Amino acid sequence: MHDPRLTKWANTMTQYSLSLKAGQQLLIRVDEAGVPLAREVYASAIRLGAHPHLQVLLDGLDEVFLTTASDEQLEYVSPIRKFEYETIDAMCAIMAPTNTAGLSGVDPAKQAKAQKANSIIRKSLFQRTATEKADWVLTLFPTPAAAQNAGLSLAAYEEFVMSAMFLDQDDPAEAWREFSRKQQHYVDYLNQVKTLRFVAADTDITMSVEGRLWINSDGHRNFPSGEVFSGPIENSVNGRVRYTFPTAHLGHEVHDIQLTFENGRVVSAEASSGLEFLEEMLETDPGARSLGEVAIGNNYGVRRYTRNTLYDEKIGGTFHLALGNAYPETGGVNSSAVHWDMVCDMRPDAGGGAIYADGVVIHENGEWKI
């Protein structure tokens, strides 16, 4: 049975998020369970006169590859995938997890090797995106596994997803444009700031963002969106951060992460569980111990922790810092196969917190003050 919500979702991504044009090449990469949405994206692209190419990623293949591949296979850079990322005009990636713990037993060292190979492939797309020669959007199709992770029924999770993406509104694209206009105020302010300091429970960390560009994430690269982000000066990060939420990465969940930075590098890492995986990721390459992103979540329609970073990093009243690779469009130069977002809650129920910009409080207890 046709679900009109999927048509609205697909049309919003192709027309608003990607601004897809006739004649452009669109790569649709979708997990197997997300095919219903991929079908609508494909149809929407055809109606726009574009040339869609569909890749369906079968469930369980990642586990097969990571548990049985040789080192040579793990480190192999596919020339076919590399060519795709060097030539496509746009990509729509649809996650649709059916087993969120499917990779929890995989050797982290093998995952790190595979990540390095994948990062070489992704790098060309990110570089082309930074110069506006290509575009991409990432979204998450609601599945029973994702709903269970969020502690919701599938029906309730679907409603949560639709609300977070503004798809419950008559004109989602216009709702995102209005959101973008409001968020641009924070971007304009932060682009004049030299130093940021984040203070929360067991957290006091400072960094320079002087000369770096802040980006308004407003429904384009991530769907849903709702954050402003930049890249800190790589050697300027000092202090300690304790992340409020458990952090899931590559199928592993790590709890109560505490990191200490000196001159831009992690010098101490703690976790109540998953420490071995965290330490393995930090050893992936030299850039994995430095920050590639600093961001503030502004989507107040996303109120609960869901164990999925696409949503959790957007929660209004939080900030997140990403270990590893920077986004070139911010001016960040940290390079790594890793990009791991970790979220800290500054809302009153989590103990509160504040963000200082050049010594002035601009964000307190989850709310902006500017």
Image: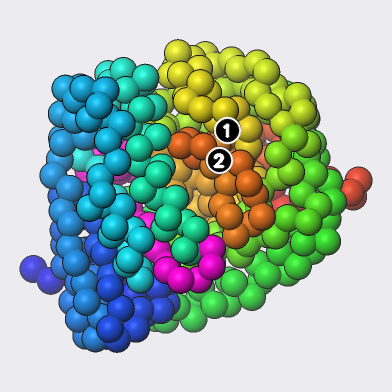
Looking at the rendering, in which quadrant would you find the C terminus? bottom right
Direction right: furthest residue: 359
Q: How many C-alpha atoms fall within 10 Å of the one at disc 2: few (<14), some, or many (≥20)?
A: many
Q: Quadrant of residue 188?
A: bottom right
Q: Residue at x 83, y 55 (%)?
A: 193
Q: Please tell me whether residue 365 is drawn above or below residue 50 in the rendered image.
A: above
Q: Give the mark, 2 or 1, whose residue is nearer the N terminus.
A: 1
Mark 2 lies on a secondary structure that is loop
Q: Residue at x 78, y 36 (%)?
A: 236
What is the x, y in percent for residue 321?
61, 39
At label 2, the amino acid type is: Ser
Residue 335 numbered mark, or none: 2
Q: Which residues are magenta?
A: 130-155
Residue 106 percent across, percent down from the top left: 28, 21
Q: Residue at x 18, y 77 (%)?
A: 43
For residue 336: magenta?
no
Answer whether labels 2 and 1 touch (C-beta < 8 Å): yes
* Picture coordinates of residue 294, whole percent (x, y): 65, 45
- Is 138 magenta? The answer is yes
Q: Residue drawn 17% across and 62% down? A: 54
Quarter of the figure that contains the N terminus = bottom left
Instruction: Name the residue nearer the viewer: 67 or 253.
Output: 67
The image shows residue 276, relative to residue 185, as above or below, that is: above
Label 1 amino acid? Answer: Gly
What whole-number distance in Å separates the C-alpha atoms at marks 2 and 1?
A: 5 Å
- Residue under label 1, please give it: 287
Q: Is residue 219 above or below residue 32?
A: below
- Residue 354 image-quadrant placement: top right
